[in-house]
Amino acid sequence: MFILASASPRRQELLQSMGCEFRVHVSHAEETMGDDLPPAELAMRNAKAKALAVAGEFPQSPVLGADTVVALEHHIYGKPKDAEDAKAMLRSFAGKTHEVITGIAFVRQGQVFQSTETTEVIFGEMTEAEIAAYVATGEPMDKAGAYAIQGGAECFIRGIRGSWSNVVGLPLYAVRELAGKAGIDLYGNHGKGSAVE
């Protein structure tokens, strides 16, 4: 059993798909934003801050924090402010390859175990009508980079290099690997391939 320091329903669904045993406690750590830091460093800093904030409240429990950023040419794209902002983000991705970087941090008994995962996402060209129709669905509005690879945006994506689950919000292979290094059992002692013997 561990604590997920995130309100993201997508991260919860991904962990549930693995058969993980966890509970959710949302972190109220303040996130660092902006282009002042390299994207991977920014994601790692925020993931660690989230995990440490919750670990301070529950020192006996392992805690997982995560933060995902979308970056193109060193510019970081957060969640869109409105529909026009979402359209502008999608226009900037059209015909280009951008990066999705997730920082993950496990805190266990005061120790921090951390890593980052980067996936390249290759967008095809999109017409203005296609962009407008997708934004009108409302799906992009709560997503960093204004799209969901597991939703309506999948038809715009020519391919990816790296972890698909990372683009959704949590790189599951990296989580399993990091849990092993931290000695954390993801499966509540009942799953095959548990991180702890």
Image: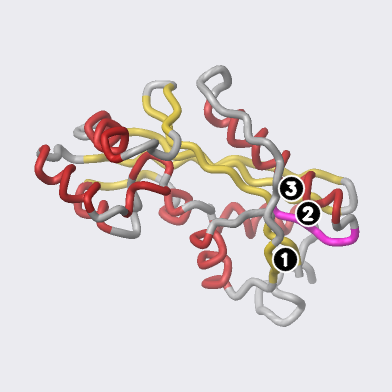
Prevalent SS, magenta region = loop
Q: In this view, does 124 lie to the left or right of 2?
A: left
Q: Residue at x 55, y 58 (%)?
A: 172
First in sequence, mark 2 or 3: give its number: 3
**In the picture, residue 187 is in which quadrant?**
bottom right
Q: Which residue occupies the foreground of this view, 19 or 126?
A: 126
In the picture, the disc for residue 51 is 3
Residue 132 is situated, as x and y percent measured from the top left of the image, at 17, 44
**Image position of 188 with respect to 57: above or below:** below
Residue designated by label 2: 182
Could you tell whether 60 is left or right of 18 in the image? right
- Amino acid type for the residue under numbered disc 2: Ala
- Name the residue beneath numbered marker 1: 195
SS for dot 3: helix
Q: Which stretch is magenta? A: 60-64
Q: Earlier in the sequence, mark 1 or mark 2?
A: 2
> Percent position (x, y) of residue 91?
22, 32
* Contact (Cβ within 8 Å) of mark 1 with mark 2: yes
Image quadrant where one finds the N terminus: bottom right
Residue closer to the observer: 196 or 19: 19
Callout 2 crowding tier (Cα within 10 Å): few <14, some 14–19, many ≥20:
many
Q: Which amino acid, mark 3?
A: Ala
